[in-house]
Image: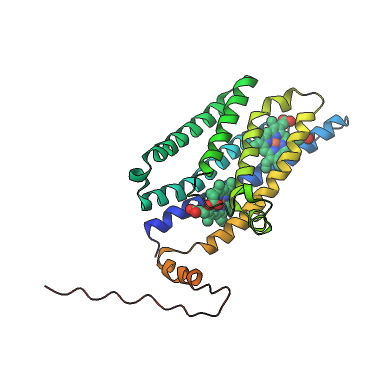
Amino acid sequence: MLEIKDILWLIHPAIAIAWVFPLIGIAVYKSIQTRQRRLQVADGGKSKIPPVVGNEHVQVGRWLSASVVGIALIGIAHPIFTKMAAKNTFATEPGRFFFVLIMFALTIASFVFLLQARPKRWRAIFASLTGMGVILLGSQPEVYRRGELKDLFNPDVLKEIVVSHYYYGILATMLMIFSLAIVQEIYQDRKNRWRNVHIVLNSLATLLFISQAITGSRDLLEIPLSWQSPYVEQLYIKQCKEQPCTIEPAPAQPAQPTP
Ligand code: HEM
Ligand code: HEM
């Protein structure tokens, strides 16, 4: 049986699987067709792929970019707010609590403005603000990162960072924001330099998405449901990875005395 707590942390992976990954599939498929058509036409030949395919890729790309930013913010919001509620951060650190709330609002607003913006300067400004917002929110202590970048040269930390759902997720989010910001440049550049930059960066983004599927599934396996938590905590407390141990079922609740 799923408790409300369990349902809340399943929102992020559920949206990723049911909405974001199908969009990635469509965007990649349309992108390959866009390229095939462009090369066939550039060779002077005819293409069976309809001319509208480029537009369709961009439309799906805009949805994809918005969805990835959205899902990253949900993934970050869940640990922040559940841990803040548990530790009563509103009372102990009200400044940081309101800072986080305002940052969420500003980040979403900047992204909405980026979706509308046309002039280069505004696209650069709103893309930077959205990216900075996501990074600032992701840097909150409540978000589990598997290690800090400042300790990158420590081999033990590096081993964890290279399998981090957080760092790859943030990088993929930055690439989606950047793709949205350079749409006009891709169309205007006759030498196709921006188009090639786009292809290289988004091939990387596709690999990052695949790694998100792997590390996200691993995280799902590692985070227990509410009823499993007391047992799984014992695995860590008793260091069962290093030594043999026995996990006892939780002691039965003493019966309430009847009045
Ligand atoms: C999985 C992510 C993505 C991949 C793998 C991808 C890849 C590609 C490829 C291969 C092309 C064709 C390049 C060519 O003509 O040689 C392309 C075109 C383009 N992409 Fe993406 N892309 C992705 C996401 C996005 C996003 C998020 C946007 C932003 C809205 C975007 C905007 C564009 C634009 C404007 C074009 C030019 C379309 C045209 O020529 O009509 N792409 N992309
Ligand atoms: C576009 C793909 C995805 C992106 C950009 C993304 C991004 C993120 C980010 C930024 C976080 C917060 C940092 C963290 O706790 O690691 C997170 C958490 C998480 N993600 Fe993803 N994710 C993606 C796909 C997935 C998928 C496919 C799954 C599972 C099948 C998944 C499962 C999780 C889980 C279990 C957490 C921890 C949630 C929590 O602590 O409340 N993610 N994700």
- Quarter assignment of residue 251: bottom left
| On screen, residue 180 above or below 86 | above
x, y (%) of residue 230?
Answer: 41, 69
Q: How many marks?
A: 0
Quick check: 243 left or right of 83?
Answer: right
Name the image colouring: rainbow
x, y (%) of residue 168?
Answer: 63, 48
- The quadrant of the image that shows the C terminus is bottom left
Quick check: 147 left or right of 223?
Answer: right
- The quadrant of the image that shows the N terminus is bottom left
Residue situated furthest left in the rendering: 259
| On screen, residue 117 above or below 73 | above
* Residue 112 seen anywhere in this rendered image of the structure: yes
Q: What residue do we see at 65% from left, 47% from top?
A: 25
Ligand 1 picture quarter: top right
Q: What residue do we see at 26% from left, 76% from top?
A: 254
Q: Nearer the viewer, residue 197 or 160?
A: 160
Q: Nearer the viewer, residue 141 or 191?
A: 141
x, y (%) of residue 215?
Answer: 61, 57
Q: Nearer the viewer, residue 123 or 67?
A: 123
* Residue 118 seen anywhere in this rendered image of the structure: no
x, y (%) of residue 29?
Answer: 70, 44
Q: What residue do we see at 59% from left, 22% from top?
A: 122
Q: What residue do we see at 37% from left, 46% from top?
A: 89
